[in-house]
Amino acid sequence: MMRLLVQTGLCLVVLWFGLLGAAPVTDDQGGAAIELAHAGLASEVASAAGSSADGSAEHQEEGAGSPILADQLVNYSAEEAKTAAAKPTVYLTFDDGPSEKTKEVLAILKREGVKGTFFMLGKEVKQYPDIARQVVKEGHAIGNHTYDHVYKELYSSFSAFAKQVMDTDDEIYKVTGIRTNLLRAPGGTFGNFDQGYYDALAKAGYIVNDWNVDSGDSARVGVPAQETINTVKGSRLSSKVVVLMHDSSIHGESVKALPEVIDFFKSKGYQFAVLTDQVKPIQFRLSPSMKWKRPKVTAAETLTLVQYTARTRTTLPQQNTQSLIIHAGGEDIPFAPQDYRMLSGTIDVPLRQLALGLHGIIRLDMANGVVEAMVNNQSASWTASEVGGSGMSLPSRIMVPLRETLQRFHFGISRITVTEGKREIWVEPSSV
Ligand SMILES: [Zn+2]
């Protein structure tokens, strides 16, 4: 529809934004967003077939047990289902890196014009800082996969798990300048997480992501590429697929499998995207029996983690003291400190300012409650619920996550600088 309008020269900039754009971002909006994320977590504890892995072998990886069937997972909201039905989305995820193999994964992703999400181990980030930075620079998402992946330690007490999460969070920040609240539990949550783990992590703002397609590349050491390809091709696919793969040093076969895995999803009409804190996570259901005996998560353990994220995240808009300037080619798009917000490391900006600043157009499809924008010949749309409204009552101001939105418009971030007075981000069309 957008494309057609543009091609026929009908520059349809609907001026409704002019009416809606004046209200300031309030604390309430920030608060609502946080609550929304937590509510999402609570309601998204999905039913999934459990892994039968007993977790005793330290290198038994995620999903090494029985396969998890997509149709046993999350019930999506109606809005999400509608969006997903229009264009199925696959999220490729790579765990246990970074390593030398990550560079090969990055080269393939670049060649294929695809972005992925890397759940990194703190100790590997420390060992391969340049590769971690390269992942970020090339527009992929980063998540926390704990520090050393040792199950026995992580699942014997929550304080040990939380310490590894915080250490990894700090290491990722030190190396890449990014705070991520995406988290993946080593081995997946099934049988490893009790409700206390879920609750404490949610309170601290972490979004726990399991998967719904296990490539099987870590079922044992050295799974041949062809087996991984066959496993993916034989999986039950939903309109939202989160694929588990690995990029540690022992996963050369996974790298070999990757091009065909990507081809497979392309041939099925999937779009590729990165996980963000705006994407509802796939989570396994709570296992009726734990693989581990351990004490319950205490209020004090929870508080330690909550205080950590409160200290390391800027969550309130008025805490922005810097203005934000996006440099795009010869254009500067300025945002005053109160015009954008940082939430758990994600920068949200007003869609209108961003789209118009990038010489795009925007319009509202009132009938369907959808906002559309076309920038750089790429169209993207958001449902009212995705951008904070519900049904026909639209938000006074539509905020979108910057990195993800730029990605949808085929722009990448090439450089970020932060000084006392301002935060500057250079963007350029992605070389796809
Ligand atoms: Zn792992």
Image (cartoon, rainbow, N blue to C red):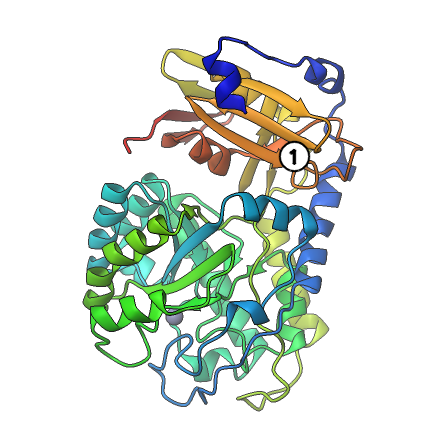
Q: Residue at x 61, y 35 (%)?
A: 382
Locate residue 402, reporting x and y percent: 51, 33
For the residue pair 381 and 301, the one nearer the viewer reads as: 381
The answer to which quarter of the image holds residue 385 is top right
Crowdedness near tag 1: few (<14), some (14–19) or many (≥20) residues, C-alpha within 10 Å: few
For the residue pair 40 and 97, the one nearer the viewer reads as: 40
Q: Is residue 250 visible?
A: no
Locate residue 294, reporting x and y percent: 59, 88
Residue that badge 1 annotates: 319
For the residue pair 145 and 17, the one nearer the viewer reads as: 17
The answer to which quarter of the image holds residue 23 is top right
Compared across the picture, whether 325 is left or right of 311 comes to left
Which element carries disc 1, helix, strand or loop?
A: helix
Mark 1 close to ligand 1, CB under 8 Å: no
Image quarter for ligand 1 equals bottom left
Locate residue 205, reporting x and y percent: 62, 56
Tell me the quarter of the image containing the N terminus.
Answer: top right
Q: Residue at x 48, y 22 (%)?
A: 3
